Image (cartoon, helix red, strand yellow):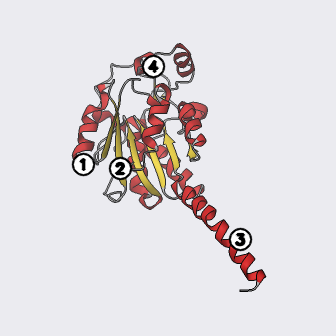
Amino acid sequence: MDRKKFLVASALAVGLPGAVLSSSKEARKKKFVLVHGAWFGGWCWKKLTALLHAAGHSVYAPTLTGLGDRAHLLNADVSLDTHIEDIASLIEFEDLENVTLVGHSYAGMVVTGVAERIPSRLSSVIYLDAFLPENGKALVDYVPPAPPSPPSAEPWRVKPMTTAEGFGITDPDDIAWVNKRLRDQPLKTILQPIQTTGKDKDVKKSYIQCSETPWFSEAAARAKKKQFITYELFGGGHNAMITKPKELAKILLNDSI
């Protein structure tokens, strides 16, 4: 081998392990799409998003139509389908593949609809203390009847069911931060049934139960029966992304999920 060929071969040999390592590291990066629950907005994922970004992952935390910074778009026609469209369109327009889709609370309805619509773009669906709806069921089918509301000129607005404290948030700064940002939920998102046909059957699914709030124990039990990968997060109430972001990030970054 002449000197020139030897130098080229040596350079390639030295660079190859680094290239393989870089490629392997890139392959382990996840693409998260985080979907918030009722009355909240994309803002609620702020602490968790920072941790996932710091670990080298891509994170999208959109706000659903009519909530958070998009509260000005709330009207009588905003429905569960609208919110499914919000997330499916984000994934399609951003050309995302192998997405880890996380739905908190009400968003269990949303991510179920997204998984039905675009299963080929998803790596996994994670239900975080969330509704696990059955075909033909609406969110209203899983919650106790609400007390009658006073007459309103805008009856499609559903006021927050509780304050930050009621969701199990105890830190005074977090309480103030959350209470300032809660917005009315569109009524049709609660009344519209989900429609599924099993197109998502090959998508890996996990369920994370926040043990301090028993609201979703029935959903967590059904997830176990369906052989979802299941985790239990202790303490912190219902909104683990705010109260237990480090513990939640550790679960989300587990290779099995």
| Residue tagged 3 | 11
Task: Note whether 56 is above or below 72 in the view shown.
Answer: below
At x 60% / y 64%, what residue is drawn? 17
At x 58% / y 64%, what residue is drawn? 20
| Residue tagged 2 | 205
Q: Amino acid at mark 4?
A: Ile
Q: Amino acid at mark 3?
A: Ala
Task: Give the residue furthest to the right.
Answer: 4
From where the camera sits, is residue 38 visible?
A: no
At x 23% / y 38%, what residue is drawn? 221
* Residues at discs 2 and 3 in contact (Cβ within 8 Å): no
Name the element at disc 4. Answer: loop
| Residue tagged 4 | 169
| Residue tagged 1 | 226
Q: Residues within 10 Å of mark 3 (few under 14, many from 20)?
A: few
Q: Residues within 10 Å of mark 4 (few under 14, many from 20)?
A: many
Name the element at disc 3. Answer: helix
